[in-house]
Image (cartoon, helix red, strand yellow):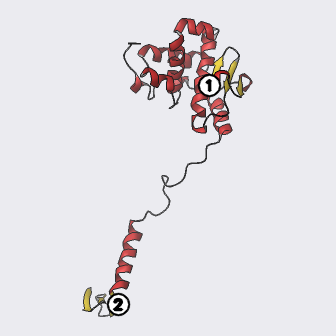
């Protein structure tokens, strides 16, 4: 029990007849300390822990392993034309200058171009069948189905059409991508637009 004993002093009683006189300031600090301690979490939460640093080579190698790609078909060097990556008849090239947070997404996209070569026999024939604009969009839709978040061609097109998603799933199913079993269950469905393209 608390009671005021004079200017700036409080009497504390624990109910057993023992009383103590303390300065108000001391009591206020003790109460605040108890309140703050009770409100603080017991230990560091997962949200409070910093994310591990992104390492370019780790992202690159982890994604190639995830995709089951043959490293002999991949090079980390500056691709022609100032792109972040290219994929075609002679394999894939990925720029080592890509910001680390985009490496996995670019590798997945270029992997899809290699899948197009495997499906159609050459990138030129894939472009003839799909059309120049859809070549990139289908690669991005398949990349999205495989887990990519950075898909600039899909964003520019306004989403994947049902036809784009069908072609993207075909790339994942028929040509050895280890992700083919889960194809079709991702955020790509939310980006589907009408077949107006």
Q: Residues within 10 Å of mark 2 (few under 14, many from 20)?
A: some
Residue 106 sits above or below residue 57 on the image = above
Of circles 1 and 2, the one toward us is 1
Q: Which type of secondary structure does the marked residue at label 2 adopt?
A: strand
Quadrant of residue 27 within the rendered picture: bottom left
Find the distance from the CA under tag 1 to the CA under tag 2.
73 Å
- Identify the residue at image location x=54%, y=52%: 50
* Viewer-nearest residue: 60 or 133: 133
**Which badge, 1 or 2, is on the more N-terminal residue?**
2
| Residue 22 disc label | 2
- Identify the residue at image location x=61%, y=47%: 53
| Residue 184 disc label | none
Residue 20 sits above or below residue 147 on the image = below
Q: Is residue 20 left or right of residue 71?
A: left
Residue 175: percent from left, percent from top: 60, 16
Q: Residue furthest front?
A: 81
Q: Is residue 152 left or right of residue 6?
A: right
- Identify the residue at image location x=27%, y=86%: 2
Mark 1 highlights which residue? 83
Residue 192 in view, yes or no: yes
- Identify the residue at image location x=68%, y=37%: 57
Q: Residues within 10 Å of mark 1 (few under 14, many from 20)?
A: few
Residue 110: percent from left, percent from top: 61, 23
């Amino acid at each position: 029990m608390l009671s005021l004993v004079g200017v700036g002093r409080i009497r504390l009683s624990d109910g057993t007849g023992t009383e103590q006189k303390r300065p108000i300031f001391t009591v206020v600090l003790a109460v605040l300390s108890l309140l703050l301690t009770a409100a603080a979490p017991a230990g560091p939460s997962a949200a409070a822990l910093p994310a591990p640093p992104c390492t370019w080579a780790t992202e690159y190698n982890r994604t190639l392993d995830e995709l089951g790609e043959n490293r002999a078909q991949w090079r980390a060097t500056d691709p022609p034309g100032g792109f972040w990556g290219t994929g075609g008849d002679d394999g894939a090239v990925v720029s080592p200058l890509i910001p680390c947070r985009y490496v996995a997404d670019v590798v997945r996209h270029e992997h899809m171009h290699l899948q197009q070569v495997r499906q159609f026999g050459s990138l030129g024939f894939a472009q003839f069948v799909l059309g120049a604009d859809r070549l990139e969009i289908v690669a991005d839709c398949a990349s999205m189905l495989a887990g990519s978040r950075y898909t600039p061609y899909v964003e520019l097109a306004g989403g994947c059409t049902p036809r784009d998603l069908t072609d993207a799933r075909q790339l994942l199913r028929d040509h050895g991508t280890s992700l083919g079993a889960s194809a079709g269950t991702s955020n790509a469905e939310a980006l589907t637009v009408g077949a107006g393209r």
